Image (cartoon, rainbow, N blue to C red):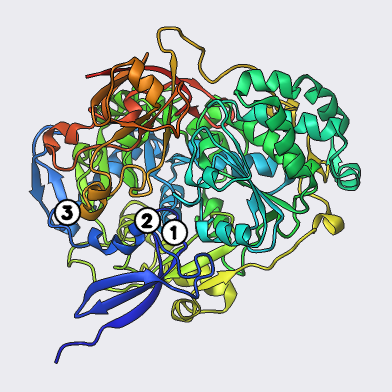
Amino acid sequence: MAEEIRWVKTHCARMDHGGCALMVGVKDGKILQIKGDPQGYLNKGYTCYKGRVSADRLTHPDRLRYPLKRAGKRGEGKWQRISWEEALDETAKNLLRIKEKYGARAVGFGVGMPKGLEHFVLIRLANIFGSPNVIASQDVCHAPREITGIHTCGFYPVADLHNPTKCILAWGSNVLSTNEEGQIGSLTLEQLKNGARLIVVDPRKTDLAERADLWLQLRPGTTQALALGFLNVIIEESLYDKKFVGKHTYGFEDLARHVKQYTPEAVSEITWVPSELIRKAARMYATAKPAALQWGNAIEHNINAFDGIRSLVCLMAICGNLEVPGGNINAHDPKIMGLAEFVRADLIPDKRKEMISAYHGTIPRLMTVAPAYFRKAVLEEVPYPVRGYYGMCTNPLVAWAESAVTHAAFMSLDFIAVAEIFMTPTASLADIVLPVAHQYEMNDIGHYGIGHGLIFARPKVVEPPEECWPDMKIMNELGKRISPPEYWHDDFETFLEDVLRPSGLTYSEFAAKGYLKGPDRFRLHEEKGFRTPTGKVELRLSTAEKFKLKPLPEFTTLPEDEDPEFPLILISVKSRYYLHSSYRWVEKLRQKRPHPTVEIHPETAAAHGIGDGDNVTIETKYGSIVQVAKITDIVHPRVINAAIGWWFPEADAARQFEWQKSNFNILTSIRKLGKEFGTPNLKDLPCRIRKL
């Protein structure tokens, strides 16, 4: 007798940071339907198209289903099937050989954005192996906001959209299209329905901008100038929160003097935003009590990220919107194991001094290595040689700035192992490829370590293919081969129990609850001050001289110099149908976005003789690619918006799936980097276009 359909509650994952509660309908071991769970803490029943078709990831005929060993030259696309025992032994042998010859630091452990608990198991693997070098995307994702927040006010200020707010200032964030670390669009819409005003700062007329009371279409790359203009208006017009500023800030007088030069008129020249609109928006934010600043990943994509983010934290602070309900809060974790204990940070006490980044003087607390510095170590042995790489949940050949340098670095490594669900451009360069179980095929915990004070249960829904292992299991078994076995578990799922032990819950009890949330601790600064050296929000950094940082945020120059040869400005945005470079092989998603498209304003298209659907060459001084024109007035006439993350799974693995043809990162460069995080200019690039 056929099994009845049963509904399993879980949370979405690996389509972004996850967080949408889902109901997954299963019959005879197969997923038949996915829908939003009306009881979901973040989504209240909403889920996006990506989430609803996400089970298609598991059943693709070309999915990796057994371990592979390179059979030809690197990148030739020739493979030999091997057993798991052989794959793990071969990987361990090569990593230990590199460690013996060059030291543990000569192996880089690579990961993309945090997708689940495996992210932190990888950091643990690196730490126990003895390598200080975890290579991550943090230079352009999350860390600039998180760490700049910690230096300025002692925590990462998260927009609180669970409590009533009077105003949402969405800065480079489009939560109706892509969700920022669990800031689901449904929460924003609920606030607007309840009367919150909305200000959107974005170069594009997004869906969110269409709903805004005020839309500020700023020139890409000028965030800090516009924020400093807001500060000028609020201080000059005495709209700041005097009680909070007097009692809880350090360096207000210095900031007030400093921002006098950033008048709305001066800032308007830089940002293209009319001066009166700057005044209006600054007043609206300052007079709304409380107001939440929902900032997006886009502000972390150029060399001036530190200045931009510092100026926005100063804005939250002087308006009294830190640690208040409906403002920007310090999200406290529930009772769970701390990150340092989980990753065994105690076993690598000199990591801060030993990691590649230390040589380059990045900001304290940034504990991953920027890809630009990793590749310098591989290609130039600066500050020391790096010869091996173990990567998971990442596709560097497409995802990292200046892809040609990535290709050169990976081709020159002695050994590469990659854990993947599907053969990608990066995996095609590996010596060993390990097939992974994916979401719905393993028990997992979501949102651990992201700083939002929440963790979500992701219980297993169906069994994985026989030889597909969860990343956690792969690293647990590899760990036993390359480091003392006592630091690893008999059963990798014990990692889940470790995280939950302080809560008193087992994993199955946690899965039944669905999520754990830390306590709300509003206005904690009134009792304890802020966790900074001065105990206050540091509008002027007291540690600036010590850490060689700017004491006050400033606007000095555009991220890249203007160039008459390249008169347009190139930006990119994430697609609602993909996650960076993932899932172009999922047919239902590919049907929604079959081609890499570049948005061009009608005036600009007409001037270049370009029609809708034409193939267009996009050029910067660093490279050129081809994408398909989409003529639209949602971009400024001087701005084009190209698609990111493109490769072609239907193409030839021996040529890395046409990784150069439409890949945005052929157009970027790592020649200029932000000092604080090693951030390259991923956007705001002078460019030109022509019809192919």
The mark total stands at: 3
Q: Can you name the residue that lies furthest to the bottom here?
A: 1
In the image, what residue type sits under mark 2? Arg
Circles 1 and 2: CB atoms closer than 8 Å: yes
- Label disc, if present, on residue 67 of the rendered structure: 3
**On the image, numbered disc 2 is attached to which residue?**
14
* Amino acid found under the numbered disc labelled 1: Gly
Classed neighbour count for the residue bearing mark 3: other residues with Cα under 10 Å, few (<14), some (14–19), many (≥20): many
- Give the label, 3 or 1, closer to the camera: 1
The quadrant of the picture occupied by the C terminus is top left
Q: Nearer the viewer, residue 511 or 338?
A: 511
**Residue in the image at 71% along x and 18% along y:** 266
Residue 212 % position (x, y): 59, 45
Placement of 82 over or under 145, stated as above or below: below
Residue 508 vs 65, above or below: the answer is below
Query: Residue visible at 53% across and 79% down?
Result: 505
Q: In the displayed structure, does residue 376 sit left or right of residue 545?
A: left
Q: Is residue 621 above or below residue 574?
A: above
Residue 506 visible, this angle: yes
Left or right relative to 6: residue 488: right
Q: Earlier in the sequence, mark 2 or mark 3?
A: 2
Q: Residue furthest top?
A: 564
Name the residue beneath numbered marker 1: 18
The answer to whether 672 appears left or right of 364 in the picture is left
